[in-house]
Image (cartoon, rainbow, N blue to C red):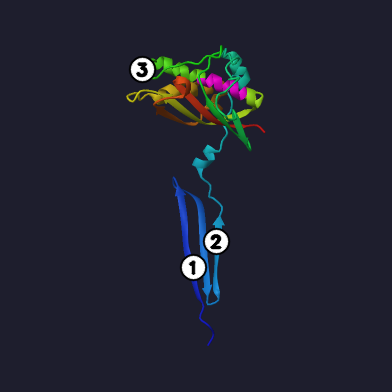
Amino acid sequence: MPSAVVLALGSVTAVAATSCAVSLRRQSRASSRSGARVRSVRVAAASCPEIEALQVVPGWHPEGTPEERVVQLGLELGGRVATNPAGVFYPAVLVGDIAYVSGQVPRNTDGTCILGKCGADLSDEAAVEAARVVGITMLATMRQQFGSLDNIVRIVKVNGFVNCTAEFTAQPAVVNGLANLFIDVFGPAGKSSRSAVGCSGLPLGIPVEAEAVVQLRV
């Protein structure tokens, strides 16, 4: 009598994201006395309006390129990039067309930094202004590293850190100082995903620090 063969069909799993299928994997397993063989079939993702909307790359500001907007807004970028950083790091690292920009401080044009703790030494308005200065410092650093701000396609992510007291809860409002600056300079392309985190201290006693992920034209 010929050997019995058992054929088992695996389950089909559908993973959905907001009512649209993102991926479909079908597994079938055939086994016999001599061994086993596993076959996986991956089906292309179905069309999803939500994902398609996220894939749209936003444009620059309608009134000019990023470099033109810096001039229009009267932003002074000179003197804000550290010439002798204390840490051992790269100001930016490029992987493909994505650049990771190191943490930036609120540096004035004379090289000094804004100092203080939010909720103690600084008013809410002063804290927001400090975050804006962090953004200007980051613009100066990105111009130095990328040659021109016009080489930036979009701001992808911003992580903001706020030096504050335990009772201070306005971290998002503080980081808005930087976020609104980027929108003023880059237009829709300046609006990014982000985090606003409170902490008990920051280097040099500064009130705000921020790092960013940006997409470049390469």
Q: Which residue is mark 2?
A: 40
- Give coordinates of residue 47: x percent, y percent: 53, 47
Q: Is residue 137 above or below residue 27?
A: above
For the residue marked with disc 1, what is the amino acid?
Leu
Decide if residue 193 is on the left or right side of residue 85. Answer: left
Q: Quadrant of the C terminus?
A: top right
Q: Gap in Å between the C-alphas at discs 2 and 1?
A: 11 Å
Q: How many neighbours does mark 1 have within 10 angstroms: few (below 14), some (14-19), or many (20 or more)?
A: few
For the residue marked with disc 2, what is the amino acid?
Ser
Our reading of the magenta stretch's main secondary structure is helix
| Total residue callouts | 3
Q: Secondary structure at mark 2?
A: strand
Magenta residue check for 45: no
Q: Is residue 188 visible?
A: no
Q: Which residue is mark 3?
A: 120
Q: Secondary structure at mark 1?
A: strand
Q: How many neighbours does mark 2 have within 10 angstroms: few (below 14), some (14-19), or many (20 or more)?
A: few
Residue located at (52% from left, 21% from top): 135
Q: Gap in Å between the C-alphas at discs 3 and 1?
A: 65 Å
Q: How many neighbours does mark 3 have within 10 angstroms: few (below 14), some (14-19), or many (20 or more)?
A: few
Kindly indicate the quadrant of the structure image that contains residue 173. top left
**Of pointers 2 and 3, the one earlier in the residue sequence:** 2
Q: Is residue 216 visible?
A: yes
- Give coordinates of residue 80: x percent, y percent: 57, 17
Nearer the camera: disc 3 or disc 1: 3
Q: Is residue 34 above or below residue 108?
A: below
Q: Which residue is mark 1?
A: 9
- Give coordinates of residue 180: x percent, y percent: 49, 22
> Which mark is drawn over residue 209?
none
